[in-house]
Image (cartoon, rainbow, N blue to C red):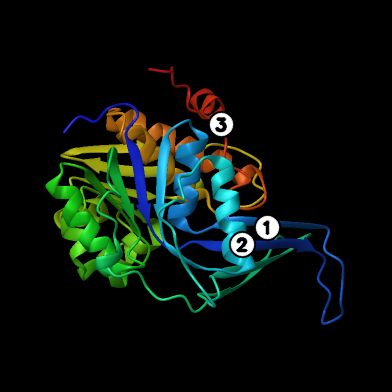
Amino acid sequence: MPQPADSCVVGIGETTLDQIGVGVASFGRPSELATFTVQAGGAVATALATVAAFGGRSRLLTRLGNDAFGRTAIQRLRSFGVDTSPVLVEEGRMSATRIILIEEETRSRREHFTRGDVAPLEASEVPTNLLLGAGLLLVDGSDPAAQTAAAHRAKSLGIRVMLDARDCADQATELWRLADVVVASERVASEIVDSNDMEKALRELQRRGPQIAVVTLGEEGAAALSGGTLLREEGLALDVVDKLGSGDAFRGALAWALVRDWPMDRALSLANATGALNCRALGGQSGIPSLEEVLSAARLRPL
């Protein structure tokens, strides 16, 4: 169903506070970091920040603790223009956070993560007005009860559902059947079909329910199967600072384009360029490019 150009992208998914540092290897001795940044993180949150950075409307439902991690994450997302009013805040609980340490010379990284102790979202906690004005619902499988309930509601309203397939173990969930669009990494796709044949992987992903299947290929770009049409975008040659969040920005750009009813080949070009440009800065959200930069890099004219 065609959607108004100002339709909102609504997301339900885990949100973190990312603490990212770059420094020299200290071999057990204390050392001062050369660079340190704190950003909101999480796949859905970063995708929604990308939508907002492109001038679109986005809305987030998640649960955070009433702690410094949660408050900072909300503040950072609001700075992009993400509507965080549906976010549920749980008193006396710790929000999810990631600590990422990058070695300055080799760029090798260590990531430490805690989900905190906030409760998962339940189906009954999805607000009745969450999908008001929505053109697409983005879910990541992290809160299956709430996300499945919201996906059923979206389908009944003619709203597209996009599944960010983060783990091949999630493939049996009802979200796959409800999804109109599935986006998976090359690793997840190859694990699902036990093959490195991307066309085979795309057809198998599509067979599980979605009309559109997309596989991100890192530096090699991205591939998609839309209906019966196979699409391919080559990677862009850029200086990479940090790949964290590039796939999330890719998904956000794709969602932004789909709610505007862009043709899939054009939407894939936009998403591919967004993911590549996002690698120019440290952290998933500090590297989100402007729409003008992406259109130029992808050699796309504004519609």
Observer able to see residue 210: no
Residue matched to label 1: 38
Q: Amino acid at mark 3?
A: Ser
Query: Which quadrant of the structure image shows residue 223?
Result: top left
The relative height of residue 243 versus residue 5 in the rendered view (above or below) is below
Q: Which x, y percent locates residue 80?
A: 55, 41
Question: How many other residues sit within 10 Å of disc 1, few (<14), some (14-19) or many (≥20)?
Answer: some
Q: Amino acid at mark 2?
A: Asp
Q: Which quadrant is home to the C terminus?
A: top left
Give the number of marks: 3
Query: Between disc 2 and disc 3, whose residue precedes?
Result: 2
CB atoms at circles 3 and 1 under 8 Å apart? no
Kindly give the residue lying farthest to the front in the view shown. Answer: 91
Q: Amino acid at mark 1?
A: Val
CB atoms at circles 2 and 3 under 8 Å apart? no
Question: How many other residues sit within 10 Å of disc 3, few (<14), some (14-19) or many (≥20)?
Answer: some
Observer able to see residue 70: yes
CB atoms at circles 2 and 1 under 8 Å apart? yes
| Element class at badge 2 | strand
Residue matched to label 2: 18
Query: Between disc 2 and disc 1, whose residue precedes?
Result: 2
Q: Identify the residue at image location x=48%, y=27%.
A: 298
Q: Which x, y percent locates residue 185?
A: 39, 56
The relative height of residue 178 versus residue 180 in the rendered view (above or below) is below
The relative height of residue 107 versus residue 160 in the rendered view (above or below) is below
Q: Which x, y percent locates residue 61?
A: 39, 56
| Element class at badge 3 | loop
The relative height of residue 190 versus residue 162 in the rendered view (above or below) is below
Residue matched to label 3: 290
